[in-house]
Image: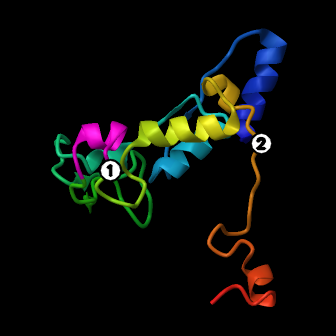
Amino acid sequence: MDCAAARDDYFRASGRYIPIVTDGGIRNGGDLCKAFACGADGVMLGSIFAQTEEAPGRGNHWGMATPHEALPRGTRIRVAVNGSLEQTLFGPTSVTNGTQNLVGALRTSMGVCGARNVREMHQAEIVIAPSIKTEGKGFQYTQGLAK
């Protein structure tokens, strides 16, 4: 979001638009949609694409391009094969973890936000909740609704 704000400031000052590509942490359709809503023009989907039948790594992914103390470059990560590239992009899904039908997820979120294109998706209002899994649980417990 900070990069998108800086990009927008630069665009207003210079008239030159610099696209932003989000790289890292995109694990499912929800992450993909949030990246676009936060200002990304594109996303890197290495681990998601590594899970496709067509991927040359056959269910393995080599992680990030820069060294990391806990995961040095060249370390192979097993991600398993999850489905075809067609399923990953367009469905139908065979898993419930959000790693398939990415285009459908983006279309749905854009529709919910009223965005007709990625530039309009950048204008979506972002609400940061403490945790979607626990959001509202306190109210549910006090009202005797949660079990």
Q: Is residue 22 visible?
A: no
The spot of residue 137 in percent (x, y) is: 72, 80
**In this orientation, which residue lies closer to the viewer: 50 or 95?**
95
Tell me, yes or no, whether the highlighted magenta stretch contains residue 84: yes
> How many numbered discs, if any?
2
Name the residue: 77% across, 25% down: 8
Range shown magenta: 83-92
Q: Determine the residue located farthest toward the top in the rendered image.
A: 15
Q: Quadrant of the N terminus?
A: top right
Report the Cα–Cα distance between label 1 and label 2: 28 Å
Task: Determine the secondary structure under disc 1.
Answer: loop
Residue wearing tag 2? 125
Residue drawn 62% across the image and 72% down it: 133
Asked whether 147 or 13 is in front, the reply is 147
Answer with left or right where residue 132 lies relative to residue 58.
right
Q: Is residue 145 above or below residue 62?
A: below
Q: Is residue 32 magenta?
A: no
- Residue 31 to residue 124: above or below: below
Q: What's under tag 1, amino acid-wise?
A: Thr
Q: Which residue is mark 1?
A: 93
Residue 110 in the image: above or below residue 9? below
Q: Main secondary structure of the magenta part?
A: helix
Q: Position of residue 16 (x, y in %)?
A: 70, 11
Tag in front: 1 or 2: 1
Residue 120: mark: none
